[in-house]
Image (cartoon, helix red, strand yellow):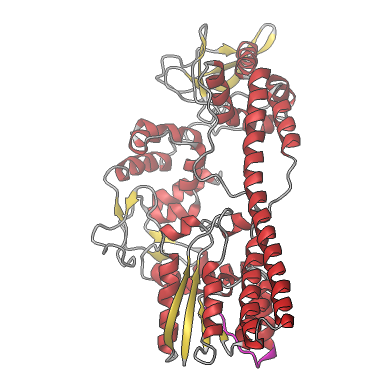
Amino acid sequence: MRAIIYTRVSSDEQTKGTSLADQERRCRAYCAENSIEVLSIFREEGASAKTAERKQLLAAIEYCQKHKGETDFFVVFKLDRFARNLVDHYAVRKILKDCGVELRSVSEQLNDEDPASKFMEAVIAAASEYDNDIRTSRAKNGMTAKVREGIWPWGAPVGYAPNPKRAQGGKKTLPDVPDPATYTILQTAFKEFASGEHTQASFAARLDNLGLAAVRGKKTTAQFVQQMLVERRLKFYAGMLSTKLDDGEDTRGLHQAMITDEEYANILGYLHGKRRPKQRHVRLNPKFPLRGGTVLCSACMRPLTGSCTRGHGGLYPYYHCYLKGCELAGKGIQKDELESAFEVLLAKIRPTPKFIAHFKKDVIKEWTARVGQIENVRHEYDENKRALELKLIKIKELLEEGTYTRAEYKERTQQLENELLTIGISSNESKIEQINIELLLDEATSFLASLGEHWKKAQPDVQQRFQKLLYPDGISYTRGVGFGTARTALIFELSQQFNAGNYHLVRPVGFEPTTVRLRGDCSTN
């Protein structure tokens, strides 16, 4: 028995990895196991929206037609490498069947004589999501086995590094080791957390005070801390491995533990509210919307808290630093003073109408250009399709005139029909969503034009998220001086660059594909 192998990736980015090589290796192994001789291999390199042609698929089909009777199987790694929708799938299948070639998939069982198998093939061809389920189920057993051996099969968590004795490019057979740059930092902070010295908010600041920000090159965020404090991650730091793959059963890992079992239990107690830390947790308080990480003490860079003092006239609300030992501890800032200053700050960073007009113009220009690129590609496909259809009509006329023999007519017709098929597949994969970009921009810029009003009218929980969006790392405030400088969200940075005469809107590297199909084909999905 003899076969050809067809491998394909869906984007240019995938060709830089091992996808094609891995597909070829598995297809060769399949053929070897089934005593099938490999006649030829057709490798379809990654195709963007501009170059989504399937030249190698066309070449593979023509190979089967020219070597009719010599090729038994058309081997692919998965059916979604073969075609992306049901119509295209069965169109190619019919051509192969006419050539006496049977489709074989390394990942799925196919049998033309079994009704159940035919049904499953239709389901797989119609739903590319099934491919992910197959891959997941195949990988699950291997990862579960690694966990039971005491080895974390995924990337090393922060604080650890891959074992230096691991073979280059080899499978992970050795446990992760402590990272010299971050292990001690995390261990110190975790032990303090376990003794009740931190909340989640102060834990991030403590990590950076110990040097984590300098090592990583960026400030530790609340999201980063939340990832480290997930129960499954904490178990790893305590020397245990826990995954959803193994029905929640814990396995003692071979790596060096960062914290003890008792410290792990204490940290969970504080996180779940079963134990009270030495300092109060940051809670949502409608009276003090700027507390909890938005406004920082200018001396120690800890988040300001808020409280009320009682006087002859009633309660007087103040923001202040809670950290004992800080030079500004207890030196309150009147609530109205700070919140009024924050409203002034919002008005200051609010994008100007001139910037908004330029920004909308640039975004619409970029969007229009990208849409135009895709539409041009589809137009080229349509033109090529019409040209091929005219050729088919002409060939039929030549047959009727006697210029072509019946054999020549059949050979030439087959060739053109194959080209039409591949063009149809490419055209289907370059469809673009219809989005009213101008309406979306109008909504967004209307919001930006009235930041202060939106902040004042928002609910307390929305205010907190709003503030975090504007100032992801918080912003310091000094009584009598005002707010310091801080990193803002990207749109406000662009606005500041525009006002300073240094505005350039450039498409980010790795900007996502325009269409749903192309996004689904990306290797990162």
Judge from the rendering whether residue 142 lies leftward or rightward of residue 408; answer left or right.
Answer: left
Along the viewing direction, whichever of 381 and 8 lies nearer the viewer: 381
Q: Is residue 188 above or below residue 477?
A: below
Along the viewing direction, whichever of 225 and 487 lies nearer the viewer: 487
Along the viewing direction, whichever of 13 and 144 lies nearer the viewer: 13
Q: Is residue 252 above or below residue 331?
A: below
Image spot of residue 237 (x, y percent): 38, 52
Range covered by the magenta-colored residues: 107-115
Q: Is residue 351 visible?
A: no
Image spot of residue 466 (x, y percent): 64, 30
Q: Is residue 476 above or below residue 458?
A: above
Q: Is residue 523 visible?
A: yes
Q: Is residue 374 above or below residue 288?
A: below
Q: Is residue 175 magenta?
A: no
Q: Main secondary structure of the magenta part?
A: loop
Along the viewing direction, whichever of 91 and 497 lies nearer the viewer: 91
Marks counted in the figure total 0
Image spot of residue 521 (x, y percent): 57, 59
Q: Is residue 109 magenta?
A: yes
Quarter containing the C terminus = bottom right
Image spot of residue 272 (x, y percent): 55, 46
Judge from the rendering whether residue 401 lies leftward or rightward of residue 500; answer left or right.
Answer: right
